[in-house]
Image: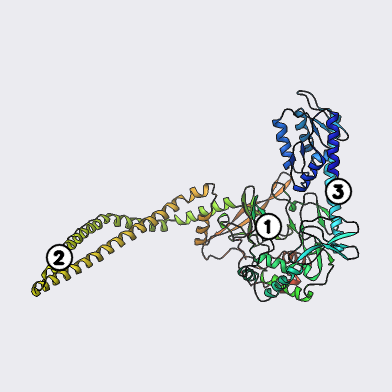
Amino acid sequence: MTPAKYVEFAQKKAKEFDVSFDGDVRTIERMMKDGIPNVGDIYLDYGVQGHKKSRPALDQLRTRIANDNSIDVLVIPRRDRLFRPNHPLDGLLLEAEFSKAGITIVYQDKVVPPTKKGARHDLAQLMVGLVDFDRAGADRRDLARKIILAQIRLAERGYSTGGRPAFGFRRSLVTEQGELVRHLQEGERVRMRGCHVVWQPDESKIDLVRRILGLLKNHPANRVARMLNDEGLPSPDAGRFRTDNGVRHLVSGNWNGTTITNIARNPLLVAINAYGRRSMGDQLRLSSDGVRELEETDFREGEQPKVIRNPSDLHVTGQGAFDPIVDPKEHKALIRDLDRRGATQKAIPRSRNPKMNPLGGRVYDMDCGWLMYRAPYSGSFRYKCGLYDLSHGQQCRHNTIKGPEATAFLLSCIRQRLLAPGLWQKLCERLKQIADREASAGQDDSRIALIQAKQLEVQAELKAVTKSLARAGDEQDLFEALKLEFDELKTQEKNLASQMNELKAKASVDSQDIAEVEKALELAMNLTELADSKMDDFELPRQLFDLTNVRLFVQFQEVEQGKRTVNQLAGGVVTFGAAEPPIEIYSGPTNRKYVKGRRKNHRNGNPQGKPELESTYPTGESKSLGNRSRGDTI
């Protein structure tokens, strides 16, 4: 109800300053309902985070002020309605932008006059603005703390903490005594005193969930997904739109293995409501003590916060308001089976486009023996230690190597091997053979011309003999003589055709050999130039790495840079073909729970770091740790 009061405040100030204002209460209510950022003189970022410097309504307002000199007054209820910056100076700079444009900013408790050219800023006004914007940023942090604590309390009591319900469940409004008020429609928001939202089984979908659980006992998740796709059953997100890499598109509606396993792992199946499986946001995050400050591992490059999957000991659980869908013991056994099946591939990132992951499964950290995983980085990509990534920085170190530079280095190594004296001599000899063949190509062309002329001559004679046979009539001796001549000409025609085919085939093979050898030699000579260029398609290097089975093992060392200690590349080993690796490559489970368990047991005196759950993971089941094609992009 507050935005309506803001409109009434703006109408009052418009009369006071004698300026026009075309907004009304109905307009802003419609804007809130339909998500419209601007109608006439009203600019509203409803449901948009206030700390963002670029917001739909704010961007449109700035554009209008820059292009419309007739605007004199900007009415904003409070400074925190304009901006909730992480740094208060950013708020002052935004406010100064409007003041320099000759705009009078009217707040509920103060008026900020426009800034004249060459005039000094009022220090007292700047100090007040700095305090206000600092309070606005602090309010975001206080709100984040309250929300986290409130969601913990709701989860402990088995209530919904927001979001879409998992497949097979729906949102219902219940009283504090657990009595059902009614089921809620998708996207419906209700606030009713003494009532809360819970997730309950959806009878129209729960049978399919039970069937999926039954199939998973004897079939892998991908096969179950194919079965459902073959039957034409829509997936949970069928008919919805989603945005990937800034592009909004319609979901295909097909099932996949990840969707199947997520359904099977849902704790709601045993009537347990879990909160805190992931942490996000730029202010505060869930911890064992309730709330924690963000750490270095919570940020991407460029200071952008990233989503973190929390360990199970941080999850907040509560008893659901319904009986378990499946037997808890059977569900626990199914989870163990799923863990066993995917133990060596779990949590390994995959690239959506293999062309942009030329060294997938070929770069190893010599400090720990782990594969280095591809990750986007500053508009490009790099390879990062898998153990450090999966343990959330608890094990190994933040060892990284830039992807394009590593690709260029390995291409140079292959060129060096390819241009070795012995191999280069063989290439030169092959080229000499091709040159000799080209020299004799002219003779083949002459033979082809002679055969073609002979074919024309034989065809003319056959035509004449055929006419004579038709005229021979009853003269038996003449007919027999002509018949013998006809058969001889046909034999000559057949032999000439065979010779012609052989010569053409030989010419085609020679041409193909020449083209392939020339292409291979050109590639060998230009590998260095290819490595030095800015490649946007790594398909050729990737194929070359596959053919040579090249692998890169890298070492790092700590280097002091000012007040920081960073890990820099110190050396390494390159292997080709079936050469033995210089270190023991890790080939065990990649489950985060397993990885963190190794560290815990190592602290307890077990040098191998083997957790109690090891029996659920077959240590030698799979030798693949390659991050080939599934999960990220530049």
The tag earlier along the polypeptide, 2 or 1, is 1
Point out residue 515 in the picture as x, y percentages from the top left corner: 38, 55
The reply, left or right, for residue 552 in relation to residue 311 is left
Q: Amino acid at mark 2?
A: Lys
Q: Amino acid at mark 1?
A: Arg
**Residue 52 lies in quadrant:** top right
When the figure is inspected, residue 177 is found, relative to residue 425, above or below; the finding is below
**Residue 266 lies in quadrant:** bottom right
Is residue 53 visible in the rendered image? The answer is no
The tag earlier along the polypeptide, 3 or 1, is 3
Badge 3 element: helix
Q: Which residue is mark 1?
A: 240
Q: Which residue is mark 2?
A: 467
Packing grade of label 3 (10 A; few <14, some 14-19, many >=20) is few
Point out residue 400 in the picture as x, y percentages from the top left corner: 65, 53
Badge 2 element: helix
When the figure is inspected, residue 568 is found, relative to residue 315, above or below; the finding is above
The span from disc 3 to disc 1 (Cα, nearest Å) is 34 Å
Point out residue 359 in the picture as x, y percentages from the top left corner: 57, 57
Residue at 29% over, 56% down: 436
Is residue 68 visible in the rendered image? The answer is yes
Viewer-nearest residue: 37 or 565: 37
Residue at 46% over, 50% down: 526
Point out residue 41 in the picture as x, y percentages from the top left corner: 76, 36
The span from disc 2 to disc 3 (Cα, nearest Å) is 108 Å
Q: Which residue is mark 3?
A: 142
Viewer-nearest residue: 218 or 192: 192
